[in-house]
Every structure is written in C-alpha cells, then in structure tokens.
C-alpha cells in the first residue's frame, strides 16, 4: 500500500495521522506529498525505500518464490488426505458356538437338545418325565453324549455354518446306521438349525415336523426353555403325543 492510500484509509476511519510537509532536521530523506493527492481516489505515489529495506524486500521475494511450489504441494497432499474416503468395513463373521446333549432313548427314538452353557437347570429330570408321559417306562435316562462345536478352539472352520451342519448330520446318520430310528426329537434352535437341510428361522419351524433321511424330525422347544417358560410344554405335548403313540 502506498502512502496516499494509507492516509486515505486512515481518514475514512477517523484516525488522524501526522505527515510532515517539509523535511525535518535529522530525519531520513522522504518524499513530500501533495495535499491534493490525499483526496484523489486513484492516487498512487511511489515512495523511495532505503537500500537496506530494498535488500530485505528482494530477499523476502526470492524466499517466497523459492518455497511457493513445495508449500502448494504440501497443502494439496493434506487436502487429499482429508477427503480420501475411509476403506469399507468388512463385517466379521458371526461366531458359531453350541453344544447338544444327545440321548438314544430306544431303537425308535433319538433326542438332541440344545444345551445352554452355564445353565444349572434340571433338564434331565424334565426329559425323563416327558419320556414317561409318552409311554417309555424308564427308571432313568440312558447315558447322554455331548456334541460340541467347534471341535477345537483353534479350528479355522469354526464359523463355517456348513461345516457345523455337516458335523451334526454325520453324528445322527452314524447313530441311525447302527440302529435305524423312526423319530428324532430336535429340541431348541441349535439342534434344529444344524440338523435340517433347510432352515430359515426358529419361529417358522417350531412345533412342526419334517421328513428327512426316511425319519420324522420333530421340532420342539429346548428343555431349558420349557423350564424357564412352562407354557412351552403345551407346544411339546401337542406335537409328540400324536407321533409317539399316545392319546
């Protein structure tokens, strides 16, 4: 900004500025301004700069010109980093972990119940009462087998639903290959999901029967669910009484 413009701005802002109209004793050489120029809107007055200021100005201009390009590149890189979209988040596979209690009641009946980890419920007594009520005079339940998935803690196929279903189906087929069965009680969602060839949702199959491997698969609530919610016993009774020879 030249001197005339500076004085004009100061005048518009109401700031009084003293400018000498003649050379002062002991002052550096200066250029006298014509008072008429102060009110001229386009007045441009070149003021002489001392030699030292000229050298500093040249040095500053050279520095700015030298560093202009790298500064622009740096800003461009920063802007690019800011607007770059985040990489898509890949959802983690759902962890598959379950256990099934398995009983071979007799030559005709196989039972698979969905076991609840850490639940201390009298599930064996409930199953024994159910078996007695449908015509199996058992003093006690036969020995049960526990079917767990995954088979190993570091199993790479632990979250593979197809592998889990293959394991459960292989167990059932091995049991009926020794002694053919007519009915399989599948109790709870895990026992059902990993036995049926086609499974959509628990509420779509609960209380229904399916034909598979020349056997009738009966879908009923798990023992733990019936103990927590006794009303579910009605669903179980309505399904199994007609299939297992009771009135």
Image (cartoon, grey):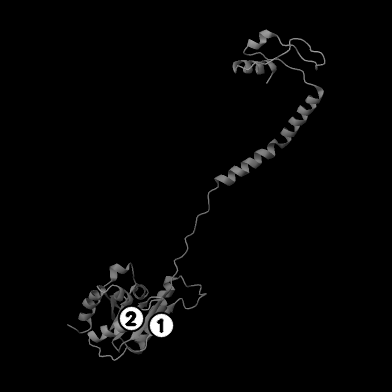
N-term-proximal mark, 1 vs 2: 2
Q: In which quarter of the image is residue 199?
A: bottom left
Vertical placement of 164 versus 77: above or below?
Answer: below
The residue that disc 2 covers is 123
Image quarter where the C terminus lies is bottom left
Specify the quadrant of the image occupied by residue 240.
bottom left
According to the image, label 1 marks what residue?
Answer: 146
Residue 109 image point, x, y percent: 29, 85
Q: How far apart are marks 1 and 2 (CA)?
A: 14 Å
The location of residue 215, given as percent across then percent down, is 29, 81
Tell me the residue at 76%/27% (across/down).
Answer: 57
In terms of secondary structure, where does tag 1 sit? strand
- Look at the numbered disc 2 and give the secondary structure of its residue: helix
Placement of 97 over or under 132, stated as above or below: above
Q: Is residue 14 left or right of residue 168?
A: right
Identity of the residue drawn at 24% across and 74% down: 235
Labels 1, 2: front one: 2
Question: Which quadrant of the figure contains the N terminus?
Answer: top right
């Amino acid at each position: 900004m030249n001197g005339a413009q500076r004085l004009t701005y100061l005048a518009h802002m109401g700031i009084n500025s003293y400018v000498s109209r003649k050379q002062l004793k002991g002052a550096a050489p200066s250029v006298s301004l014509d008072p008429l120029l102060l009110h001229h809107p386009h007045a441009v007055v070149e003021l002489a700069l001392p030699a030292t200021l000229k050298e500093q100005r040249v040095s500053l201009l050279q520095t700015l010109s030298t560093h202009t390009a790298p500064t622009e590149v740096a800003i461009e890189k920063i802007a690019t980093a800011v607007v770059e979209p985040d990489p898509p988040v890949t959802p983690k596979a759902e962890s598959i972990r379950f256990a099934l209690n398995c009983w071979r009641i007799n030559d005709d009946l196989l039972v698979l119940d969905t076991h609840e980890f850490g639940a201390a419920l009298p599930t064996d007594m409930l199953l024994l009462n159910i078996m007695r009520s449908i015509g199996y005079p058992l003093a006690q339940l036969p020995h049960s087998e526990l079917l767990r998935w995954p088979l190993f803690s570091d199993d790479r196929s632990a979250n593979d639903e197809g592998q889990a279903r293959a394991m459960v189906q292989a167990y059932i087929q091995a049991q009926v290959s020794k002694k053919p069965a007519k009915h399989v009680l599948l109790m709870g969602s895990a026992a059902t999901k990993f036995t049926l060839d086609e499974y959509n949702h628990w509420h779509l199959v609960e209380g229904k029967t399916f034909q598979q491997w020349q056997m009738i698969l009966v879908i009923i609530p798990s023992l733990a669910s019936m103990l927590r919610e006794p009303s579910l016993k009605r669903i179980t009774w309505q399904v199994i009484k007609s299939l297992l020879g009771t009135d």
